[in-house]
Amino acid sequence: MPRARCRTVLGKLFAAVLLVPLVAKYAAADYSFRFPIGDDSTAGPTIRFAAVSVFGSEAGGGQAGSGFVIDRHDGLILSSAHVVSGLNGMAWIAFPNDDDRRYPAKVLIPERGGSLDPDVSVLQLDPALKGLRAMEVQFDAIREIEQHYITGFGPSSPQPLPRKALLTKITECEYTAVVEAFSGDSGSALLSQEGLVVGIAVTGDHGTGKSWAKMNVLPLSCVRDKILELVSDRQNDKIMKIVWTAGTREFEDAFLPPPVDGSGWVSNLRLAKAMLGWIASRTRQISADKKHQENAIKIISERRLGYGMVLDLARAEEHIFLSATQDVARTEIETRLSDAISGLQNTMVSMSRGCSGQPDGVRPVSWDTLQIRGNTAVNALSAARTALATGQTQVAVQRINAGLSELDALVNGLHMNCSGDPHGEDPVYYGRYVAFRDKLKTELQTALRAL
């Protein structure tokens, strides 16, 4: 037998011996947790966890981190890239209250030797594994004012340990969570008050004792496309046909119940995959009719698939941006403005000590002048938010454009504004400031076309 064929046959036999018994034996643990609302511990939704522990070997060895199932059809799991970076392409997964049995999972990303930025990994269990449950995701912006939880296992717990997390936005793609966390929590889900996964808790800063005082959080919205690239598209056409049948029993079964993983229910992950596939087709075909577009906008909004997807649709449909999106656009612009104002204020704190030279940073040379630019931008965006809320659309547009102009002046003024080199140096995180500015401009300017 040729050597290459022999290796192929042996590989198939190994996979059969390794995986078939797991398919026959595994049944998902039904671990649930009721999310409290305020002080009422019985008021929130009950969430069935699909959290897992990630190990580096089938038996023995410590826990590498945590993770969570996001798709039961393909057996996809999310975790942190650094959790699996040294595992040579294969991790071992344990489910709640079942730590004695571990299941092999292939590391799809990051690739061996690949970048760990962003700090997200996607693993795949055998898709034939029975009894998997998946957690519902959302790709909308994280709302700082909402209550959130992390769901990691800590260093050795047999089941996930939900803990409250207080979030602070650093940039669009970086949050910190004040939470009691442990080394085994890396890669755990960050859940919203509704029990939807909004981010991944990645790395921690040590507090007192063995616990961490803070964890860094990566929003799912920032790795949406990277995740969806790995989701199969075999259900896309079927899902979109249901989307266009609003009002039917099939539609209600698929989209109207609360987010639970059950018969007939289309998960947010699968819906996002199908919706983005349909949006991509708009650039190659004649535009969809108004009813289809209206249904798409409604579902994107209701299922919190992310305003980024509304913008994707806007760019694909440049010559007919729906009048139906105007109400959605106003609401989302108000939200974006609130996020932009707090984000800019936090970014200005970083900018104010953004040059290297001291442990806590050094002020840029022209910071007194640049700070005025930043404060003017904050005031303009605040005025735009007020104008939108009172129906003064044109005033809002003018103030947004004025605020973005001041933001441009602030960021451009920081270029080479640190002392050291004879010609000046950029602040340490200048690239982040530029990315923050560019992303905010793109989102607001695209959305303004709907008003």
Image (tube, helix red, strand yellow):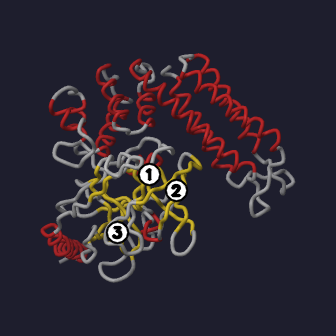
Amino acid type, residue under disc 1 in the picture: His
The residue that mark 2 highlights is 177
| Vertical placement of residue 101 versus 243, above or below | below
Q: Position of residue 238 (x, y in %)?
A: 20, 38
Q: Is residue 121 left or right of residue 212?
A: left
226 sits to left or right of 428: left
Which quadrant holds residue 189?
bottom left
Q: Residues within 10 Å of mark 2 (few under 14, many from 20)?
A: many
Amino acid type indicated by mark 3: Ser
Where is mark 3, residue-wise?
Answer: 53
Mark 2 and mark 1 in contact? Answer it, CB < 8 Å: yes
Viewer-side residue, 134 vs 313:
134
Tally the numbered discs: 3
Give the number of the disc on residue 148. 1
**Mark 2 or mark 1: which comes first in sequence?**
1
Residue 429 placed where, x, y %?
67, 53
Q: Is residue 68 left or right of residue 377?
A: left
Residue 403, position in %: x, y? 67, 29
Q: Earlier in the sequence, mark 1 or mark 3?
A: 3
Q: What type is the residue that disc 2 sits on?
A: Ala
- Looking at the rendered structure, the secondary structure element under dot 1 is strand
Label 3 sits on a secondary structure element that is: strand
- Using the numbered discs, state the Cα–Cα distance from disc 2 to disc 3 in whole angstroms: 21 Å
